[in-house]
Structures are given as C-alpha cells and as structure tokens.
Amino acid sequence: MKPVQSTSRLVALLVVVLVGAGACTFDPQSGGSGGGGAAPAGAAGQATGASDTSGPDQRGRPTPAAPSPTPKATRSPTPKPTRSTTPKSTPSSGTPTVAGCPQGQHQREVETHLARLGGFGAVTVDGRQSAADCAAIKKFQKRYGIRPVEGRAGPTTFDVAQRLATTDPAACRAGAGTTFCVDLTRQTVWAMRGGKVIMEPTVTRTGMSGYRTPAGTFTVNFRNPKEWSDPYEVWLPYWQHFTQGMGFHETTTYLHDKSIGSHGCVNLLHADAVRMWELGKVGTRVVLIGRRSGT
C-alpha cells in the first residue's frame, strides 16, 4: 500500500505544478524583462481588443463579436431590381435655402456693409441669404481671416464689416509721402500717399488693457523681416518699430480674438503685414487716432 500512496502523492503534486504554471505567464504589457506575476483580470481580452472596456489607444474601435458557427449556404432566389425614383427638390417659400451656407443673425447688416465696401461680389440687401450673398460673404471672410469661412453673417463677420465700412481714411493726417494710418477706435489700419489711399482699410488688433497703444504721430525707425521679442519670446514677422518697443507685425494668433490683444503693437494679418512691409521704410510716417475701447 505504501507504493500506491507515494504514487498518488506524486500525481497530485504534478497536477498542482501544471495548474500553477498557467497562472504565472509573462505579461507583455507589464514592462518587465521576463519577470512576471499574474496577469490582471481581463488582460488577455485587452491585448486582443476583445475586452468590454476599450483602452486609450482603442477609442472608437468596435468590440469584435465572438465567432459564431458559419451556417450552411442556402440558395435563395435573387430578387428582381426595382426602379426607385428620387423626388425632386422643390424651392421653399420665403427665405432661400443655400446648401452649406446658413443664414446668420446679422444678414441684412452684413449685406449693407458689403454693398458699401464693394469688391466682394453682388449682394442684395434684403436680409435673406442667396447664392450670391453666400459667395460674397465667404470671400469677405477669407480676405479678413474670419473662421470658419462658411458664408454665415455671424457676430464676427458683422463686427469686422461694420468697422471697415465706417472707417474714414480722410480722418488720418497723412503727409505727402507714405503714411501708415491706424484708427484705434475701430481697430483698422490703412496706408496713404499724397492724399490718396494706396492700401485700403483692413483689420488690426492693438494693445489690450494695461498695454494701451498711444495715439499720436510717429516715424518708423527700425525694420526687420523677422524680429525676436526678448520679453515675450516670440517671433515678430515683418517688424516695423515706431515707438516704445511698439510696431507693426504679423500676428501669430487668431486676430479676431479680442480678449488677448497685444502688448501695444499693431497686429496684422499675414497679407497685410507683407503689403505694409513693401510700402514702408525707415522714415515712414505713422499716425494713430482715437482710442481702443477698454484701454
């Protein structure tokens, strides 16, 4: 009987060893170098993408379903194709609907200002969106860096159009040579020479609260196509300095975000910064009028 008992004990010990080995396999996600420890519950499912909860790198991936037996193919009669007719769209009464071009809450005001400014295409001042209005508003938005370019007469489009349409270039005391003019009240900028406008009014963003851009007459006394700002550690493309560390330059942020403003500089869109660089030189006259609200 002793040999039988020994054999039974040996068999039981062997079973325990084999079962234990299966629970201590190396976890490839543990980051170890061959050591292990038991894999956490559900680890096998996560490794294959079949767990109930997706990991960060699985966001949006569908959870594969468990395989099911493939049924035997059965031959079924092929249905005859049926001819369907798509109903034709009919124009709705009232406000025209333009695909991909919603109507904004300032439709009539924007139409009025664009008609006054000109150069953006034909618009009908009736407060209703049309294909022509949509195209004109999109062109305007693209020119002045308004996002998104969708043809909608929203608050930003209305604000920019109103500021530009009400800017009076003659209010700038321009000299005989080239003069850069800035209307701090309307946040617009333009250029004149010999009493004539050589760059139409465009949008700008000047000093925010605590960093007011001063009104007055100055002169461009230093230029650099790519200036580095020491205090703010940022590049100032097409830099033209005129007073107290302030100058014209292309902005690297969204120009129409008024909450951030500048530290006194005259921020410009890329195309306008390039144009003013082409027109200006050391000695160019700079005239700033008005005052930005809140500064």
Image (tube, rainbow, N blue to C red):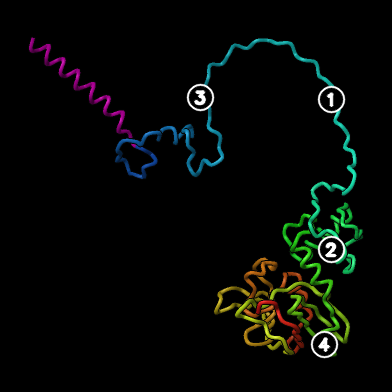
Task: Please say whether residue 238 is visible from this viewpoint.
Answer: no
What residue type is disc 4 on?
Ala
Residue at 59% in and 73% down: 234
Q: Secondary structure at mark 2?
A: helix
How many marks can you see? 4
176 relative to 295 in the view: left or right: right
The residue carrying pointer 1 sits among few (fewer than 14), some (14 to 19) or many (20 or more) residues within 10 Å by Cα, namely few
Nearer-N-terminus badge (1/3): 3
Task: Please say whether residue 101 is visible from this viewpoint.
Answer: yes
For label 4, the residue is 174
Q: Are marks 1 and 3 in contact (CB under 8 Å)?
A: no
For label 3, the residue is 66
Residue at 86% in and 80% down: 197
For label 2, the residue is 109
From this view, report whether residue 72 is shown above or below residue 94: above
Q: Closer to the camera, 212 or 293?
A: 293
For label 1, the residue is 84
205 relative to 36 in the view: left or right: right
Can you say which quadrant of the picture contains the C terminus?
A: bottom right
Q: Are marks 3 and 2 in contact (CB under 8 Å)?
A: no
Give, as a single range, the part of the protein colored magenta: 1-26
